[in-house]
Each structure stands twice: as structure tokens, then as C-alpha cells.
Image: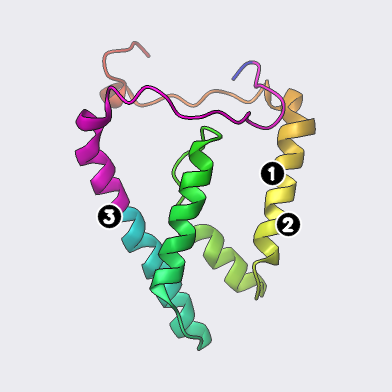
Amino acid sequence: VGEIPQGLPSFSIPRGFEHLMSLMPTAILITGVAILESVGIAKALAAKNGYELDSNKELFGLGLSNICGSFFSAYPATGSFSRSAVNHESGAKTGLSGIIMGIIICSALLFMTPLFTDIPQARLPVCCSFGSTP
């Protein structure tokens, strides 16, 4: 993949809202899917473990994390089917598992990025490559 910038993303205030109206329909659709996914995962795990879920708190946390992430050029965050399942099956009961994973990811970004330069770059199939050559 070549050189990967080392370190954490820097803080920046989002600017340039000239494409806002053209992106709004897609943003609303992605938001709907994110809400369904996150609340669906939370409800399934709440039912399986016998605890009560407040969907308002779940969505408030999701929205707050995405607002904070926008200042660091982060991708939109949603609930994770795979990570939630792994945490559940490994016996994680609190948010401490997420904090530990965050520390591991930050450590990798700060200290291990030179090791990632030789990872092969994935390629799209020819039918999905939008005109590029294989």
C-alpha cells in the first residue's frame, strides 16, 4: 500500500459545505441504516443478556461520537455486528473492552505504521473497477 502516515489524525474544523445539498439524500439514507444497525445489535444483545436498553441513549452516544469524529476526519461510526459478537462470545461485560481496543489501535497508528507498507493493495474485480484496467 506504500507509505502510511504515522500518528493520529490532527484536529481540524470542517469547511467547505458546497456539496452539502447534493450529499444530503445519501447522508439521510446512511443515517437510517446506521440507526437500524446500531439499535438492532443493541436490542439483540440486550435480549440475549437480559438487560434493558434505552435506544435514546444509544443514539445520543452514536451521534456524539460522529460529531466528535468529524473534527478528526473520521469515517461515520455505527454499531459493529462482528465486534459486538466477538466481545459477547469472549465474555466482555463492560465498555472496558472498547477502551482496550482503542488503545491498541492508537498504539498501532503511533508506532507500527512502517510495518504496514508491504501489505498488498486489494483490487476490485474488473466488472466493478469503474473503467480502470486490471
In magenta segment, residue 122: no
**Mark nearer the N terminus (2 vs 3):** 3
Name the disc covering residue 100, or none: 2
Closer to the camera in the image, 11 or 74: 11
Q: CA distance from mark 1 to mark 2?
A: 9 Å
* Mark 2 crowd level (few <14, some 14–19, many ≥20, 10 Å Cα): few
Residue receiving disc 1: 105
Name the disc covering residue 32, or none: 3
Q: Residue at x 38, y 68 (%)?
A: 39
Q: CA distance from mark 2 to mark 3?
A: 29 Å
Residue 105 percent location from the top left of the image: 69, 44
Which of pointers 3 and 1 indicates the residue nearer the eye?
3
Q: Residue at x 48, y 76 (%)?
A: 45
Residue 82 percent location from the top left of the image: 51, 59
Stretch of the chain drawn in magenta: 3-32
**Given the image, on which type of amino acid does mark 2 rest?**
Ile
17 displayed left or right of 100? left
* Element at label 3: helix
* Element at label 2: helix
